[in-house]
Amino acid sequence: MRRFLIVGGGASGVITAIAIARTDSDAVITIAEPRAQLGEGLAYSTRETVHRLNVPSDKMSAIAELPEDFQEWWGVDGYTFQPRAIYSSYLRERLELYAEDRYTHIQAKVSELLPGAKARAHFDNGHVADFDFVVLAMGHGTAKVPDFLQNTPPNPRIVLDVWSGSELPEAQTLICFGTGLTFIDIALSHLARSPANRVIGLSGSGHLPEQHTRNRITPFAPALADVETLEKLRAYLAGAGEHWREAVDGLRPVTAMMWRAFTEAEKEEFLKSDGSIWSRRRHRIAPDVAAHVETEIESGRLEVRSVRVAGVHANDHDVKVLLDSGEEITGDVLAICIGRTSQADDSLSRFLIDNQLTNTGPLGLGLSVDLANGRLKDARGIDYPNVFAIGPLRSGEAFETTAIPEIRKQAAEIALELRTSR
Ligand SMILES: Cc1cc2nc3c(=O)[nH]c(=O)nc-3n(C[C@H](O)[C@H](O)[C@H](O)COP(=O)(O)OP(=O)(O)OC[C@H]3O[C@@H](n4cnc5c(N)ncnc54)[C@H](O)[C@@H]3O)c2cc1C
């Protein structure tokens, strides 16, 4: 029997458990996850049907070796964009199928982890246990807070984390700061609640995410040599012209190698100057979601503006957003929709870093992970033999590490490493 601990039962943790259970019949798996339902995490806990997957069904399989598994499970065509709410049921069914009675869900957090030949885990319910192998899957950082709110006193009308699981306060006019993927979700759910509701989306660029085409495209197939420096990457993308989708999607097989080839200065420059347009083009919304957004804009219920925000005042009655131009925008609630930090700022990562058991990854993002095998590195930069990390925790080392196609590949690689480290 080999005892595994997976810390975090969001998509990454469950996909890893499935990969291990499929390849190791001796595996006995404990998943630590404070949420009641496995597989939900940040992205897949929504119950709202307007929240849709932004990756086509034929790329959402949890199992790298069975790429059509998700579309077959749900009985849909590959090039469709299904509701996000169904995805955690899929993950739980696959976990049941492959791990059956070989996994346990402990509904608690791991508060301390002491690596060693047996890694010792302390849970926040008082339980302590030793494991042969550990996979860290604590996921995304905390919600980002814009600078203009740093000195604003907390107020129930200002919602800093729209994915906290709590309903937004009662509102007719909802102001959102940020106009990316999170904004699309929050705006469409608010508009669906009442015909009287309206949404004002504010951001520096005023750009919405790009959309997938109605029909499947054929990605380009660039070689690493075409994109191995930032200058070459920019030339490759600029040269694609109106075929930017083919260029962006075509990078997927070489992205990890490209990121490794970039210097630290190039990575920093890319994230600062190109990151926003990249994520708008890389993480696109479904075509019918884009059409829905367009209809709401035409009807006047949804407004999107490019602005500079100077400050915010909230009281018992309303919230006012003050712009650099002197204009004031009034609404009932302000929701911050600018995503999560890529810092490993969850409590267990903090414990590991503060106790010099590991370091942050490059640029201070994520944790220090050996991408060649998925192992966490200790504070001296040496791989732990039996501790791994997956998903957003790799965001300093890897460039694209949060979507299901990347996560399932990482999970398969970890399972392979574990099989060969018998
Ligand atoms: C809104 C949204 C929509 C997305 N849509 C798509 C999509 O359509 N297609 C796609 O491919 N990707 C999508 N993604 C990206 C991707 O699938 C997710 O980022 C993915 O859910 C990452 O999963 P995770 O388990 O690593 O992290 P999380 O979802 O953050 O889960 C981490 C889990 O770990 C738990 N945890 C944290 N600390 C501890 C601890 N100390 N002990 C125990 N448990 C702990 C938390 O409770 C949490 O449940 C989306 C992401 C978001 C945010």
Image: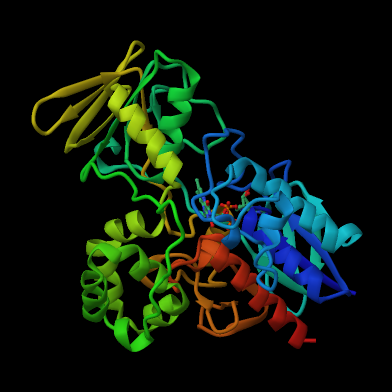
* Residue placed furthest toward the left: 325
Q: Which quadrant of the rendered structure holds the N terminus?
A: bottom right
Q: Is residue 186 visible?
A: yes
Q: Which quadrant of the rendered structure holds the C terminus?
A: bottom right
Q: Is residue 399 above or below residue 323?
A: below
Name the spot of residue 399 as percent of width and height, x first. Answer: 42, 70
Name the spot of residue 212 as percent of width and height, x first. Answer: 41, 53
Q: Is residue 250 above or below residue 192?
A: below
Q: In the rendered picture of this protein, how many numbered marks are placed on residues?
A: 0
Q: Is residue 247 above or below residue 227?
A: above
Give 291 or 41, whichever is nearer the viewer. Answer: 291
Left-right relation of 328 to 67: left
Name the spot of residue 402 as percent of width and height, x first. Answer: 51, 61
Q: Residue at x 26, y 43 (%)?
A: 147
Give 90 or 390, whichever is nearer the viewer. Answer: 90
For residue 152, which quarter of the picture? Answer: top left
Left-right relation of 236 to 384: left
Q: Residue at x 88, y 62 (%)?
A: 102
Left-right relation of 140 to 4: left
For residue 231, which quarter of the picture? Answer: bottom left
Q: Is residue 374 above or below residue 354?
A: below
Name the spot of residue 291 as percent of width and height, x first. Answer: 38, 38
Q: Is residue 352 visible?
A: no
* Residue placed furthest toward the top: 317
* Residue placed furthest toward the front: 215
Coloring applied to the structure:
rainbow
